[in-house]
Amino acid sequence: MTSTQPGNSWPGVRGKCVVPCNVFFGNDHNRIMAEAVANVARRVNATVEEGSDTLDLSNCKLISFPDGVFKVLRSVSDNIRVITLADNEMKSISSKLFSTFTQLRELDLRGNVLTKLPASVGEMEHLTCINLANNSFSVFPDKLTEIATLERINLQGNGITEIPVEKLTDMRALKWLNVKSNPLDSNTQSALQSLHGFETEC
């Protein structure tokens, strides 16, 4: 029988697992499939051991960002430049994500069920790209317009009807905005199409 105690190998995962599954998800094992937990643990441990600047937790059946990940990556959080949380089931994002990974350049949250972002996203000083496609936003996440370094915003496939056009024109670094497949009103579409400071897909 394969052991899954801390310090032993995870089933189907090469090498030792630095962090046991209960660090990530507490003791509620009934809610999380064992292979999903092992997958998260493997990816986080690989990020730490390899000194990678990328954390990829896409397609891990996550409903939130595991608190245990903050603990494990605390010592290397300043090295993380890219986080991918695409194709999960996340309904919200903790402000802790942005206060922990302050050096983040790219954040991929596409394919979740997010309806809003925490206010702390507006405090990011290095973020250049955010992908929020195919979520459940009905309102444009206004705090994005406060990120001076942001170059690319993808909001395709949401339920947004209005865009803060004037605020977007004040974003000096913005190069590309994708708001395709949103129920934009005609005035907003016209206003976006008349902009010349950045490329718009609507």
Image (cartoon, helix red, strand yellow):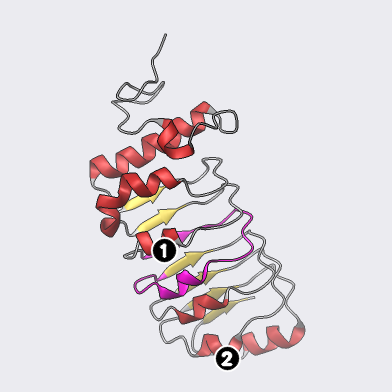
Q: Which quadrant of the structure image shows residue 137?
A: bottom right
Q: Residue 112: where, in percent of width, then height?
A: 60, 53
Queried whether the magenta region covers residue 62, the answer comes back as: no
Relative vertical location of residue 198 with respect to residue 119 in this rendering, above or below: below
Q: CA distance from mark 2 to mark 1?
A: 26 Å
Residue that protrudes farthest toward the top in the picture: 1
Q: Residue 19: where, in percent of width, then height?
A: 34, 33
The residue mark sitting in front, 2 or 1, is: 1
Read off the residue under disc 1: 98
First-in-chain label (2 vs 1): 1
Q: Which quadrant of the structure image shows residue 46?
A: top left
Read off the residue under disc 2: 166
> Between residues 5 and 85, which one lies in front from this camera angle?
5
**Can residue 195 be seen by looking at this rendering?**
no
The image quadrant where one finds the N terminus is top left
Residue beneath the point at 33% across and 60% down: 81
The image quadrant where one finds the C terminus is bottom right
**Can residue 113 be seen by looking at this rendering?**
yes
The local crowd at label 1, few if under 14, some if 14 to 19, many if 20 or more residues have their Cα within 10 Å, is some
Q: Residue 11: where, in percent of width, then height?
A: 41, 21
Q: Secondary structure at mark 2?
A: helix
Residue range highlighted in magenta: 105-128
Residue type, numbered disc 2? Glu
Residue type, numbered disc 1? Phe
Q: Secondary structure at mark 1?
A: helix
Q: Residue 133: where, in percent of width, then height?
A: 59, 62
Relative vertical location of residue 156 with respect to residue 186 in this rendering, above or below: above
Queried whether the magenta region covers residue 122, the answer comes back as: yes
Principal secondary structure, stretch drawn in magenta: loop
